[in-house]
Image: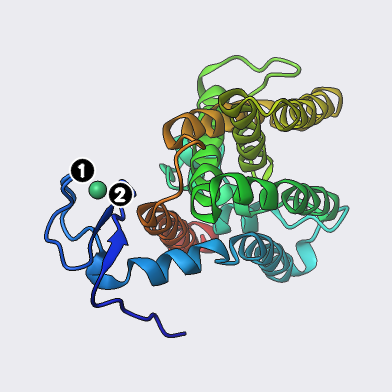
Amino acid sequence: MMLKRQTEGSVICASCGVLVGVNDDTCYNCGRRNPGLWGFGPALRRLGQDLGFVPLVMGATITLYALSLLLSGSRIQGMLSPSTEVLFLLGASGAVPVFQFGRWWTVLTAGWLHAGALHILFNVLWIRQIAPGVAELYGAGRMIIIYTVAGVVGFAVSSTAGMYLPRLPILGGAAFSVGASAPIFGLLGALVYYGRRTGSSHIGQAGLQYALFLGLFGIIFPGVDNWAHAGGFVGGLATSVVLDPLKRERVDHLIMALACLALTLLALITSFVTALPVLMR
Ligand SMILES: [Zn+2]
């Protein structure tokens, strides 16, 4: 794929969105250096409308689940559930990995892992249902930022609750936790905030109804990490407030989104490499 470079005329500042000369050193409005990104801004912006982030999230999630089954081999349990050791190796979060093993980066990886066939089936269906809409409302880049931050907040909250709070029937924090529902709740938070900010009440209502439905599901069924759900929702909502859906998506958001994905990949690799000696004992 070639990125065409614009060499003359004006472009939109990558930070604040005002028109600047493509070769300007700094943006007159926000002071950003190199506001035209060496003339690559327009090409990056065109990429941003269809970066394929939603299929990427779905594809990576399914691939990691297949890998976790493959690595579990004969230790696959119940409903096509990978073994706890393998989930630990690939980056499960929770009180045990984060606090007992110091694997704090698993707050980035756990949202991409799943504990069984139904677990991943439902989550992938929810991603397919919600993520394209959020990408349309916020832009694909901001959708990825919201998704990533919501997962981090959700698993940080759940691991902390699992470590420091007493185990309650519904609100027990998790010793081990995986699953895309923390970031999915973040996307729902983004829909709720969109409705509030823009007055588009049916979008906000839809987000709230989904969140209540899924939240209730988690309270009724045992073994659901409700702290991760609540944390993901709040994390996604707070990130949406900062990103402000009334402002247009900037090239900087795409760069941040790529950084989120790169950090996540780095965290996955770190998980794998550092867990090997633990598992081989
Ligand atoms: Zn600017």
Instruction: Report if the beta carbon of the residue with label 1 is closer than 8 angstroms to ligand 1.
Output: yes
Q: Mark 1 highlights which residue?
A: 30
SS of the residue under disc 2: loop
- Disc 2 packing (10 Å; few <14; some 14–19; many ≥20): some
Q: Mark 2 highlights which residue?
A: 18
- Disc 1 packing (10 Å; few <14; some 14–19; many ≥20): few
Tell me the CA gap for discs 2 and 1: 9 Å
Q: Nearer the viewer, residue 175 or 247?
A: 247
Position of residue 201 relative to residue 246, above or below, is above
Residue at horizontal 84 percent and vertical 29 percent from the top: 217
- The amino acid marked with disc number 1 is Cys
Of marks 2 and 1, which one's residue comes earlier in the chain? 2
In the displayed orientation, state which residue is furthest to the left: 25
Whether residues under marks 2 and 1 lie with C-beta atoms below 8 angstroms apart, the answer is yes
Q: Nearer the viewer, residue 162 or 140?
A: 140
Please state if 133 lies on the left or on the right of 164 as rendered.
right
Q: Nearer the viewer, mark 2 or mark 1?
A: 2
Residue at horizontal 58 percent and vertical 66 percent from the top: 50
Instruction: Report if the beta carbon of the residue with label 2 is closer than 8 angstroms to ligand 1.
Output: yes
SS of the residue under disc 1: loop
Q: Nearer the viewer, residue 226 or 69?
A: 226
Residue at horizontal 51 percent and vertical 19 percent from the top: 164
Position of residue 80 relative to residue 242, above or below, is below
Q: Position of residue 137 (x, y in %)?
A: 60, 44
Q: Position of residue 22 (x, y in %)?
A: 22, 67
